[in-house]
């Protein structure tokens, strides 16, 4: 288990207890794929955990040269958002989403990368909260008192950019200890190049030397009493088994021991954070996330794309 002082994951009961304390900020970080008919902000207004506020991951972000969404925000952009949410440096920030585990890990990655380690994810999100018959509210949320949040420093070791990833493709992780082992959170078909990408005209396939580890293999499906399907993280032993099946026993052991550095990637940097959080739960410390992920990589004509195992 990670030695981080603040728990990475919380149960609904733990969140309920914490929500009654001072300096706790609860944020709904729900996000859906662009082709989804669901509207996260409207769902937030319809039903949410009491005192929660809505964190729009596409708004608290920095512009990107290729027009990519929800990229890591600049330091002042993050601080300004915290001030509007009434968050202070010592606030306990609790993040959740309406699918269980999907976009909330990306929000946690953002907070932790800016050094706000007093932050957690509600395992199972709003559906798990509802399954415990805990209270909800609706309508326009009450205004919060703004705060002052000093400009933080982004921990650059948490992120990888295109230049770093392109350079990493020339290194064999089995032969070079300086190579990042890249874990791809997209579906197996997209990784192999047999299924199309959601973005029209974008090639599928994968980054050379990367390994396929679809994010959903870190999760288990749950059904609430009203029939709602949602996800939660697997127990740590099962997380390790999934990692082991993806990269082999020897590599999995080296990753957890911190010998081999890991970078997670996905389609646009969202579900890569599910792998990031799952690995953090296993105590992995040498881990980063490729912010642009496959969309940024495959859009660039200089990229080498593989379409086989």
Image: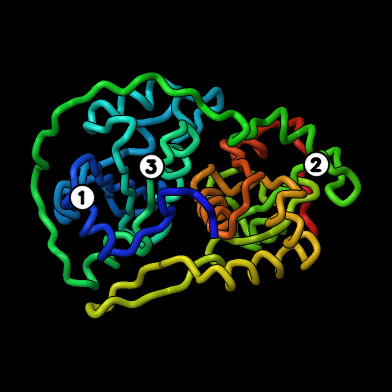
Residue found 23% across the figure and 28% down from its top = 84
CA–CA distance in space, label 1 to label 2:
42 Å
**Which quadrant is home to the N terminus?**
bottom right
Quadrant in the picture for residue 125: bottom left
Q: Position of residue 147 (x, y in %)?
A: 22, 24
Q: Position of residue 187 (x, y in %)?
A: 60, 61
Residue 263: image tag = none
**Which quadrant is home to the C terminus?**
bottom right
Residue 44: image tag = 1
Residue found 37% across the figure and 62% down from its top = 123
Tag nearer the camera, 1 or 3 = 3
132 relative to 163 in the view: left or right: left
Q: Position of residue 302 (x, y in %)?
A: 76, 30
Foreground: 236 or 140?
236
According to the image, label 2 marks what residue?
179
Q: Are marks 1 and 3 in contact (CB under 8 Å)?
A: no
CA–CA distance in space, label 3 to label 2:
31 Å
4 relative to 147 in the view: left or right: right
Quick one: SS at disc 2? loop
Quick one: SS at disc 1? helix
Foreground: 189 or 149?
149
According to the image, label 3 marks what residue?
118
Which badge, 1 or 2, comes first in the chain's sequence? 1
**How many residues crowd around disc 1 within 10 Å: few (fewer than 14), some, or many (20 or more)?**
many
Quick one: SS at disc 3? loop
**How many residues crowd around disc 2 within 10 Å: few (fewer than 14), some, or many (20 or more)?**
many
């Amino acid at each position: 288990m990670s030695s981080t002082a603040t728990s990475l994951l919380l149960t609904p009961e733990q969140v309920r207890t914490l929500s009654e304390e001072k300096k706790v900020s609860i944020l709904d970080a729900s996000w859906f794929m662009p082709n989804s008919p669901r509207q996260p902000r409207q769902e937030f207004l319809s039903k949410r955990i009491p005192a929660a506020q809505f964190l729009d991951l596409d708004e608290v972000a920095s512009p990107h040269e290729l027009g990519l969404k929800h990229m890591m925000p600049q330091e002042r952009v993050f601080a300004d958002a915290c001030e509007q949410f009434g968050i202070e440096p010592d606030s306990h920030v609790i993040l959740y989403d309406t699918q269980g585990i999907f976009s909330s890990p990306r929000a946690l990655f953002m907070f932790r990368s800016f050094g706000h380690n007093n932050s957690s994810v509600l395992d199972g999100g709003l559906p798990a909260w509802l399954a415990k018959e805990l209270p909800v509210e609706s309508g326009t949320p009450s205004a919060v008192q703004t705060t002052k949040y000093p400009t933080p420093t982004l921990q650059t070791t948490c992120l990888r950019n295109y230049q770093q990833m392109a350079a990493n493709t020339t290194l064999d992780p089995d032969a070079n200890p300086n190579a990042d082992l890249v874990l791809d959170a997209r579906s197996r078909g997209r990784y192999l190049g047999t299924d199309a990408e959601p973005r029209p005209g974008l090639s599928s396939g994968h980054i050379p030397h990367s390994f396929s580890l679809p994010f959903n293999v870190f999760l288990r499906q749950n059904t609430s009493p009203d029939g709602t399907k949602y996800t939660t993280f697997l127990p740590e032993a099962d997380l390790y088994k999934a990692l082991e099946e993806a990269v082999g026993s020897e590599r999995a052991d080296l990753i957890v021991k911190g010998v081999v550095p890991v970078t997670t990637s996905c389609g646009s940097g969202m579900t890569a954070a599910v792998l990031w959080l799952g690995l953090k739960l296993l105590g992995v410390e040498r881990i980063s996330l490729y912010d642009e992920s496959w969309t940024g990589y495959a859009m660039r004509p200089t990229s080498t794309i593989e379409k086989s195992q």
